[in-house]
Amino acid sequence: MILKQVKPKELLRTLLKAGFIVKRKKGSHVFLELNSQKEKRATSVSMHPGTIPKGTLKAIFKQTGLSENDIKKLLK
């Protein structure tokens, strides 16, 4: 099941809820990092208007280690 179209601000808010922190910003990109006991993960979110393309969203899922269901729960 594919996640509905997500806007960058929604995704950023969701990743912050999941424990990621904003590491830096450059232009329209926000770079996030998660430092846990087990692993270190990083991703970036492009803060352009509109929704995030499906392929980009899947890549962010892979980089963050979060599943689609995790994101859906956090979006609510």
Image (spheres, rainbow, N blue to C red):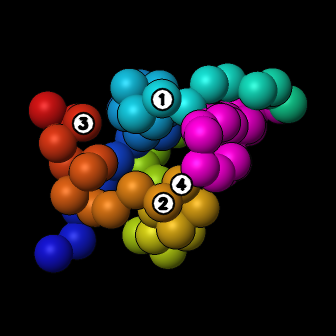
- Magenta-highlighted residues: 27-48
Q: Earlier in the sequence, mark 4 or mark 3?
A: 4
Residue 21 in the image, given as x and y percentages of width and height = 62, 25
Q: Mark 1 — residue?
A: 19
Residue 48 in the image, given as x and y percentages of width and height = 60, 40
Looking at the figure, which quarter contains the N terminus? bottom left
Q: Which residue type does callout 2 highlight?
A: Gly
Q: Is the residue marked by circle 3 packed among few (<14), some (14-19), or many (20+) residues within 10 Å?
A: some
Q: Are marks 4 and 3 in contact (CB under 8 Å)?
A: no
| Residue ID at (23%, 36%) | 75
Q: Using residue 47 as the reference point, say whether residue 6 is left or right of it.
A: left
Q: Are marks 1 and 3 in contact (CB under 8 Å)?
A: no
Q: Is the residue marked by circle 4 packed among few (<14), some (14-19), or many (20+) residues within 10 Å?
A: many
Q: Mark 4 — residue?
A: 64
For the residues labelled 1 and 3, the Cα–Cα distance comes to 11 Å
Q: Can you tell which mark lies on residue 74?
A: 3
Q: Is the residue marked by circle 1 packed among few (<14), some (14-19), or many (20+) residues within 10 Å?
A: few
Q: Picture quarter containing residue 33?
A: top right
Residue 47 to residue 16: above or below: below
Q: Are marks 1 and 4 in contact (CB under 8 Å)?
A: no
Residue 50 to residue 30: above or below: below
Q: Which residue type does callout 1 highlight?
A: Gly
For the residues labelled 3 and 2, the Cα–Cα distance comes to 14 Å
